[in-house]
Image (spheres, rainbow, N blue to C red):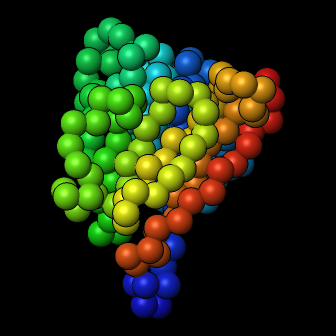
Amino acid sequence: MPASSTIIRVGVISDTHGSLNAGLTEVFKAVDRIIHTGDNEAPEILDALARMAPLDAVRGNMDWGKWAAKLPQEDLITIGGISIYALHDLARLSLDPEAAGIRVVLSGHTHRPEARWRGRCLFLNPGSASLPRNGQAPSVALLEIRGINVGYRFIALPEG
């Protein structure tokens, strides 16, 4: 099978705040990797996610203690030849992603799902998997990489 037809699925999650939604196991059962963009508040959350798929995680403003100090504030991850920059708060972005050749910037912090393209760079926030705002459902995102193409979709999780 040519590499361009292979789809790499990445589960993107943020703002779990110490709780994993029961629907995550089903949603992430077919992902190749998971990226948590901060505010998980408990190492057990990361352990549970790492049992689902290989995990990358960054530290959010609510992640404190020795376990959290081991997490980077930001991370540059390459998956399937695509450069992905992960951080918690997009307001702290300190580089020009397009100039750096980054195709995807992942963030959290706002608890609201959002996606927008700036040139060839996708800015993606999955929303909060446990504490959504403005009456929205808990959510995550699936990032799909096929060769040089990047797509995404939001997945609403069950309440509670």
Between 60 and 32, the residue placed more toward the observer is: 60
Relative image position of residue 109 (x, y in whole percent): 48, 26
* Horizontal relation, residue 59 to residue 75: left or right: right
Q: Residue at x 70, y 33 (%)?
A: 138
Q: Residue furthest right?
A: 159
Relative image position of residue 62 (x, y in whole percent): 43, 14
Residue 99: image quadrant is: bottom left
Residue 100: image quadrant is: bottom left
Q: Residue at x 27, y 41 (%)?
A: 75
Q: Residue at x 23, y 62 (%)?
A: 101
* Relative height, residue 106 to residue 94 (above, below): below
* Horizontal relation, residue 143 to residue 68: left or right: right
Relative image position of residue 155 (x, y in whole percent): 69, 48
* Relative height, residue 74 to residue 142 (above, below): above
Relative image position of residue 52 (x, y in whole percent): 55, 45
Quarter of the C terminus within the rendering: top right
Q: Residue at x 49, y 48 (%)?
A: 124
Residue 31 shows up from this direction: no
Q: Residue furthest top?
A: 65
Residue 75 shows up from this direction: yes
